[in-house]
Image (tube, rainbow, N blue to C red):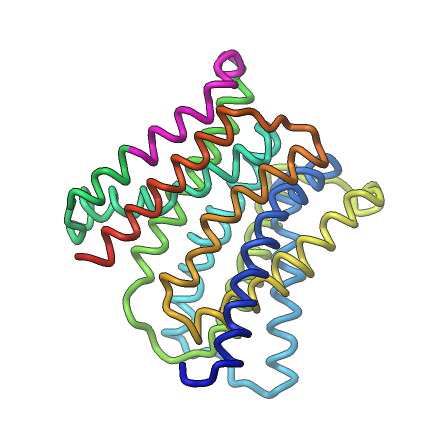
Amino acid sequence: MNNPSEKNSALFAVGVVSILWGTTWMASKIAVRSMPALQVSGMRHLIGGSLYVGYFFFKKFPFPTKEQFIRIFWVSLIMFVLCNGFSVMSVQYIPSGLAAVVGAMSPLWVALLGLLIFRDTKLSRITTAGLLLGFGGVLITFYDYIEELANTNFILGVIYGLIASITWALGTLLTVKDSKKLDPYYSMGWQMFLSGIMLSLFSFATNQHVPISSIGTEGWLSLTYLIVVGSVIAFMAFIYALKRLPATQVSIHSYINPLVAIIIGDLMMHEGLTAYLVIGTIVTLLGVYLVNRGFKKV
């Protein structure tokens, strides 16, 4: 990028993403106190996606081709329905900061899945060290929650978080191939919109929903925050940065998001900012950094 002002704007966008996505964990935690997690995710993506798609229809963008639409559907299913659905379900049972740390494990799963299933990852010394540090750091963060591991709901929350991070990694590996040209904002809007429909239908089919009229002010405020800040502003900033900076530079947000989530969780919900949680998070993120660095050297 030759334009310094454009680069500075892109770096600012990375900062915006780093902070805002870190706060959405707490917003989700607050939202699920008013309505089931699947309803939260469904409404968030349905409304957020509608805003994106509606804007592009207003701009007379052509309807996606059949091939593009099929790809959008599968990305939507893996990255939004499964990943986001399970991540929001996880915060029903575990602290939002802890859920964010589990979510930050995705690059570790990318390395393992790439090695064991897709056979396209080389296990270098840096990657191996990163994996060991990453999983070791997660174990440290759970030290303060050893007694909670006997709680079925707590375990369920951890499992949901792990499924979310694994499906994100799987989606990353499956969508890394080049695809037909389609405006990334438009594609993102369709992914949100389709996932919103699927999540909403599933929440109704499984009776995991409450009447709209019963959602209180707190629920609406948190949902509005997730839509406007998490789905619209943060995603726009993320794609803006990704189009102008190397992906490795944009990925800095993944190291900051969990730290923001932990701090916000302690300030707003008194989830507890303990030494083990902080040290474990730092060790985990160091492991993620080494794994990402190992990818760059392959």
Residue 64 lies, in percent from the top left, at 46, 78
Identify which residue, 265 or 197, lies in the foreground: 265
Q: Dominant secondary structure of the magenta stretch?
A: helix
Q: Compared to 63, does 268 lie above or below? A: above
Q: Is residue 234 magenta?
A: no
Relative side of 49 to 138, left or right: right
- Residue 167 position in % (x across, y down): 39, 46
Q: Quadrant of the C terminus?
A: bottom left
Where does the N terminus fall, quadrant-wise? bottom left
Residue 76 as seen in the image, left or right of residue 220: left
Q: Residue at x 34, y 47 (%)?
A: 289
Q: Residue at x 48, y 76 (%)?
A: 7
Looking at the image, residue 246 sits to the left or right of residue 114; the answer is: right
- In the rendered image, the vertical position of residue 248 relative to residue 78, given as above or below: below
Q: Which residues are magenta?
A: 133-150
On whether residue 144 falls in the magenta region, the answer is: yes
Out of 295 and 15, give the one closest to the viewer.
15
- Image height check: is 96 above or below 234? above
